[in-house]
Amino acid sequence: MQTLVDYISQGELLSVPDGSLIFAPGDETRAFLIVTEGVVRVEQTNNAGRTVVLYRVEAGDSCVLTTTCLLSDRPYSGFGYADGDVKAIAITPTKFRNLLRSDNCFQELVFRSFAQRVGELTDVIDDLLEHRTDLRLARWLAKTNVSEIKMKQHEIAQELGTAREVVSRALKAFEERGWIKIGRGNVTILDRDALRTHGVQVNV
């Protein structure tokens, strides 16, 4: 089965160092990017300065914001940062549109990735509409695939689109229940099942 990475010959290799700003609100879309190594973190920031992570683009994936901008001729509305060193294939807008018209496989891969990202964005919106931050935090912790999350509390708050103080209180409550252990710049998962159960509580 073909993947977007199979179209490496259609573009040019782009290398971006860790922490670099790849795009920002108002930027014109210069290329359709297919990540081959590393991760691109896509964020949205409101007028009050509150930031939420929308999704991450990993190897083999494309960015739904980039696709949307290319299809609509509109500028970016969010930020994209390199999480670690990133390598990607940059396909020019003209070649991207030509491939969409002429290559059914490319078209299917692009829109399949687009649909998956839209589903993830819907989950983010649902979480933001839910006022119980402790439930959202419990679900987020339970979904991680590592036992030790090496992130500071303000970074976790950014993931959830809330304030650091709110996350700090919820983490402390989880630690008191024996579900996690809070360290300096890290959180260790001790009882993933308890977090998962807490996260599916009905918000009343």
Image (spheres, rainbow, N blue to C red):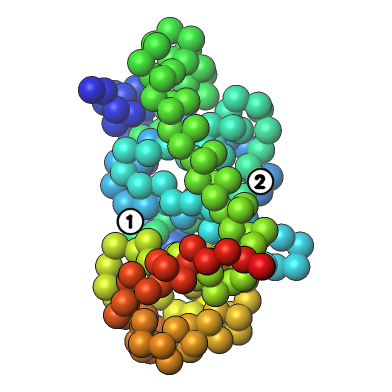
Nearer-the-camera pick, 73 or 11? 73
- At label 2, the amino acid type is Ser
Question: Which residue is tagged 2?
Answer: 77
Which residue corresponds to the image point at 63% horizontal and 42% vertical from the top-left? 76
Which residue corresponds to the image point at 52% horizontal and 41% vertical from the top-left? 119
161 over 174 or under it: above or below: above
121 over 74 or under it: above or below: below
Q: Residue furthest bottom?
A: 176
Which residue corresponds to the image point at 62% horizontal and 37% vertical from the top-left? 28
- Looking at the figure, which quarter contains the C terminus? bottom right
Q: Which mark is residue 85?
A: 1
Q: Is residue 101 left or right of residue 194?
A: right
Nearer-the-camera pick, 125 or 95? 125
Decide: few, some or many residues near mark 1? Use Cα within 10 Å; few <14, some 14-19, many ≥20: some
Q: Residue furthest left?
A: 1
- At label 1, the amino acid type is Asp
x, y (%) of residue 91? 42, 28
Which residue corresponds to the image point at 59% horizontal and 72% vertical from the top-left? 133
Q: Secondary structure at mark 1?
A: strand
Residue 32 at least partly seen: yes
Q: Secondary structure at mark 2?
A: loop
Tag nearer the camera, 2 or 1: 2
x, y (%) of residue 126? 61, 53
x, y (%) of residue 161? 60, 65
Decide: few, some or many residues near mark 2? Use Cα within 10 Å; few <14, some 14-19, many ≥20: some
Q: Residue furthest right?
A: 47
Q: Is residue 160 left or right of residue 45?
A: left
Nearer-the-camera pick, 157 or 91? 157
x, y (%) of residue 51? 62, 64
